[in-house]
Image: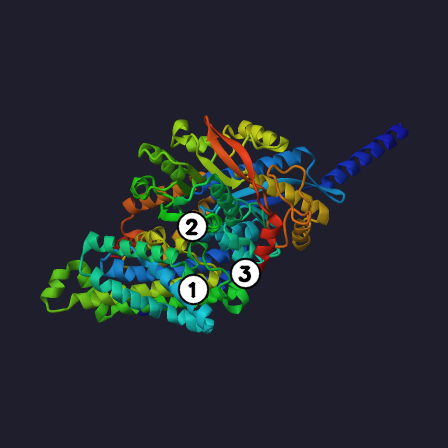
Amino acid sequence: MKRFLPLLPWLLALAVLALLPQLLTVKYYLHLSILALIWVVVAQGQNLIQGFTGYVSIVQAGFMGIGAYGSTLIGLHFQWPLWATIAMAPLITALFALATGYPSLRVKGHYFAIVTLAFNLIIVIVLVNYSELTKGEAGISNIPKPWGGSREAFYYLALVLAASLTLLAALISRSRVGEILLAIRQNEDLVAAVGIAAWKYKLFAFVVSAMYAGLGGALYAHFQGFINPEIFGVAQSLDAILAVILGGSGTIAGPAIGAFLVVFLPELLRFADSFRLILYGLILVLATIFMPIGIVGIAKAAFARIMRREARHGG
Amino acid sequence: MPNHKFTRACAALAMTLVAGASLAAEKKLTVGVADALTGGGAVYGLPQANAVKMAAEEINAAGGIKVGPDVYKIDVIAYDDKANPTEATNAVRKLIDRDGVKYILGFCCSGSTSAVASFIGNEKAVMLVGNAAERSITTKKIPNLVRTRPPADYTGQAAGTFIARKGQKRIAVLGALDVGFYAQYVDSVEREIKKTGGEIIAREVFSLKDRDMTPQLTKIRGLNPDAILVVGYVEPAAFVYRQAVELGMNIPRYGFTSGSEEQFLRVTTSEQMEGVWDLRPTELTLLSASKNGIAYHANYTKKYNASPSPSSPYAYDQLYALKAAIEAAGTVDNTEAVAKALRNLAVPPQVVMQYQPVDGKMFDVNGQAYTSNGAFQWQKGKWVFVEDLPSDSKAYSQFLSTLN
C-alpha cells in the first residue's frame, strides 16, 4: 500500500482535472485550462533540458513556433489529415533541434542560454519575413480545429497528452538516461571522466525538449485557430523557464503546477488594470528570490518537516 | 378617514407601479473593450478605450439606447490585450464567456485583432474593430465584424499619388516593414509613384522598440534620395524625424503614423518636426475637424487631461454606430440582427471621423468603413490639414470584395 501512496496526489489531480469541464460553469476557465495543459507539455520539455540537465534554453517558444507553423502549413499545402499534421509537428521540430542543438551544446552556462536566445530571435525573424509561406506578421487564420472546435473535446485531448508526456518525462528521469542527465547537471566533467559521452545525452535532452515544444505549438495552433510570429517570441520562452522555476526545477510535478501559474496568474490579476503586469512581475521576482526551489520543493520540505515531527512525537 | 386611507393606498399603489414600470424599462447593456492598455500598442489602445468610455457617458447622459419600451444605459468593461494575440483571445473569451458581453469594441492592433477575428464568426457576439489596419481583417466576410478604420493600402494609394504629384522620384522608405499593414501601405505607394517614373530606392526596417535609427538613416543618406517615407508607430517614427535632422538630411519627410502633437513632442522638438507630412486617413486634428470633432477634442481633453490621439475617434464612432444599429434592429439580444443592421447603417450624425459611405451605408458588404484621406503637415507645433487626398471608396470596396 505504501508503495502506491506517492501516486495518490497524482491520481487525485487527474480525477479533478478529468471532472473539470463538468464542474466549470464559465467556459472562459475551460479555455484557460486548455492553454495551461498545452503549457504543461511545453514546460515538461523545458524541464528536461533546464531542470534535469542544468542547461537553461531560451528557445522553447521558437520550437513551439516551428511545431505550430509546421503542422499548419503541411495541412494547408498538402491537405494532410489534421491528426497526421499534429503528429508530424514534433518530428519536424526534432530535425531543427538536432541542427541547432549540435553547435549550441558545445558551449555551456550563460553562453548556451545566449546561443539559444539567438536561435529564438532567428526563428521569429524568419517567420516574420518569409511571408510568402508564413503570411508574416498578419499571421495565419482559420487553422482547422478538431471536433468542430469543441472546447470540451479539445480539453480531454490536451489532458491526455499532458498526462502522457508527464509520465514519459517521469520515466526518462528515472531511467539510466535520466540519471546521467542529473549527473551532467551536478558535474559534467566528472561524467566525461568516467567515460560517458555527455554530449549525446545533452543532445538527447535538447531534442526531446524541443519535441515537447513542437507538439505544444501544434496543439496551440489547432486550438486557437490563429498563429503569428509574435506568439512564439522570447517573452514566451521566458514564460516556459518561469513555469519550471516557479513549480520546481528538476521535479515532475513542478512544471505542471508552474504551467497553470503562468497562464492563470496574469488573467487573475486583470482586476489591477494597468498595474497588472507590474504586479505579475513583482510576484515572479519575489517568488524566484524567496522560493528558488519552487512550490514543489517547498511542499516537499514542509512534508518532510511534518513527518520528522510526527516521528519524534511517535518515538 | 376610510377615504383618506383609500386615497393613500391608491397613491402608494400608483407609485409602486410607476417605479416598477420605470425599473422594468431602464436596463443595463454591458459592452466590452479589448485593447492594448499597456505596452507599445497603448499609444493607440488606451485612447481608444478612453474614447469608448466617454461615448458611453455621453449616450447615457442623453437618455441611453432606446429599444422599444426599454432604455439601456451602457456599462463598459475594458481589458488589456497588450496587442498580443494570446492575450487578446483570453480577454475576449473572458468578456464573452464570463461577463456575458455581446458587443466588443476597441482593437487597435492588427495581430491581436486577427486572432480574435479568427473565431468571432462562431460566437453570438458582434466585434467592432478600430485602429487595426491589416487588410485581411475585412476580407474574410465575417458577418458579425465591422471596422471603422480603412485598410492601410487604401490610404497608401492616395499617399503615393500625392508624393508623385510633389515631383520626388527617388524615395527611401524607413519603417516597421515587418508589420503587414505598413508593408501594404508602402506597396501601394510604390505602385502609384511608379506610374510617374518614380521608384523606391531603399526599404530599411526598424522594429517597434528601436530608438536609434542613425545606422539606417546614414545608409539612406548615402543613396541621396529625393525624400524619405517613414511608416510605423509614433515613437520610433518620431526618433527617425529627429535623427534625420541631426544627420543634416534636408529633404522632404513623409510619414504614416497618426500620432498626436503631444505624442511626437515627447521625443522630438517642434523645430525638428517642421515640414513633416503625415499622409493618413483624415483623422482627428483640430484644423480638419468637424463640429463633432472639435467637441470631441474639447471633451476628451477635459475628461482625461490629455489630447486625444488622432485615431481614437475610430473607437468613439464604434459605440455610436452600435447604438444606431441596436435601435434599428430593435433588440440587444439578437446579435445577428444587430450585425445585419450595422451593415445597413447610414453614417450616424454623432460620429467624429469623416466617413465616405458606400451606396449610402457606413459599412460596405465586407463590414469595412472608409474615411477620406488627408495630407497633414507639421507647421509651427501643430498638425495642419492641408488637403484631401483623392480616394475612391467604392472602387476600393469592390477590390476588397475580390480578396479572400
**Secondary structure of residue under mark 2:** loop
* In this rendering, the label closer to the viewer, 3 or 1: 3
Label number found at residue B404: 3
Q: Residue visible at 20% across and 53% down?
A: A111
Confirm whether residue B202 shows in the render.
Answer: yes
User: Which chain does the numbered disc 3 sit on?
Assistant: B
Residue underneath mark 2: B179
* Residue B284 relative to residue A79: left or right: right
Which x, y percent locates residue B281?
A: 54, 41
**Marks 1 and 2 close (CB-CB < 8 Å):** no
How many C-alpha atoms fall within 10 Å of the one at disc 2: few (<14), some, or many (≥20)?
Answer: many
Of residues B146 and B36, which is closer to you in this image?
A: B146
Q: Residues within 10 Å of mark 3 (few under 14, many from 20)?
A: few
**What residue sits 36% from the left and 61% below the top?**
A64
Amino acid residing under circle 2: Val
Mark 1 vs mark 2, CA separation in Å = 25 Å
**Do circles 3 and 1 both sit on a common chain?**
no
Chain bearing mark 1:
A
Pointer 1: what residue?
A219
